[in-house]
Amino acid sequence: MSESKSVFLFGYSGHAYVIIESLLDAGYEVKGYFDFKAAEKNPYSLEYFGFEEEVDVKSIVGNHLVFPSLGDNKIRQKILSFFQKHQLNQFVAVDPGANISRTAFIQPSSYIGKNVLVNAGSEIGQGVILNSGCIVEHECQISDCVHIGPGAVLCGNVSVGKECFIGANAVVRQNLTINAGNVIGAGSVVTSDLLEKGVWVGNKLRKL
Ligand SMILES: CC(=O)SCCNC(=O)CCNC(=O)[C@H](O)C(C)(C)COP(=O)(O)OP(=O)(O)OC[C@H]1O[C@@H](n2cnc3c(N)ncnc32)[C@H](O)[C@@H]1OP(=O)(O)O
């Protein structure tokens, strides 16, 4: 049996629009969406199937594909648990413009956006967002439900714990560890391990 190319989304706002564009470009059909209520804006004319906690999702979705199309890391983690509990058919959504090494490994329900580079030996967990144009260099380890923002750069061998958010255009120097739940502000430069959980910003440029 050939695998379905029809997708049901969970969440329908700005981040979903980006995913829909990638899915359509990659030849998928988007059947519609689940969310806690019908979206006010519906730019892709999608059918609303209800709130997943209140409808029989499995009978609606059948063996078609499901995808968590929302940006909040914690809610995405909840949706992944829902997918697992109901044994729904997950997959990796890859924009055709992404560049992924043959030795990278990516787990289901992750999104690899436009112009993203994932280099050799990197391992990407479930429900991860690699947003537009970010670079994940060689042998990085990205845990579940992390969001790497647009244009951010992880140099080689960086390890990022669960549910971290790395802001747009941030840079993380090679061989560093960022523990779970950390937030890195847009444009920040990380030059040492972040073992303590917090929101981190800035780039302390000085003459050496
Ligand atoms: C497709 C997409 O849109 S994906 C999403 C991409 N978005 C991003 O990457 C944005 C990431 N978010 C940020 O950078 C945010 O500013 C955060 C999370 C770091 C902080 O947000 P908040 O807690 O709301 O902080 P707030 O805006 O109140 O700023 C607090 C202070 O930090 C400073 N600050 C905030 N962000 C940064 C930053 N990225 N770099 C340097 N300083 C910063 C502010 O200037 C302010 O300084 P002050 O107290 O001296 O006035």
Image: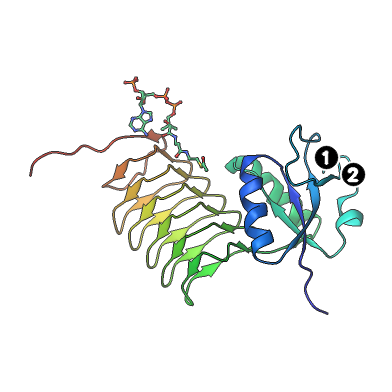
* Label 2 Cα crowd, 10 Å radius (few <14 / some 14-19 / many 20+): few
Classify 170 as above or below 107.
above
Q: Residue at x 60, y 40 (%)?
A: 72
Ligand 1 quadrant?
top left
How is the model colour-coded? rainbow
User: Which disc, if any, is residue 86?
Assistant: none
Q: Residue at x 67, y 53 (%)?
A: 20
Classify 188 as above or below 102.
above
Q: Which quadrant is home to the N terminus? A: bottom right
Q: Residue at x 51, y 64 (%)?
A: 98
User: Which disc, if any, is residue 51?
Assistant: 1
Quarter location, residue 14: top right
Q: Residue furthest bottom?
A: 1
**SS class, disc 1:** loop
Question: Residue 41 vs residue 206: left or right?
Answer: right
Asked whether disc 2 touches disc 1, contact meaning CB atoms under 8 Å apart, the reply is: yes
- Tell me the kind of residue under disc 1: Phe
Question: Residue 144 vs residue 21: left or right?
Answer: left
- In x, y percent, where is residue 74? 61, 41
User: Which disc, if any, is residue 55?
Assistant: 2
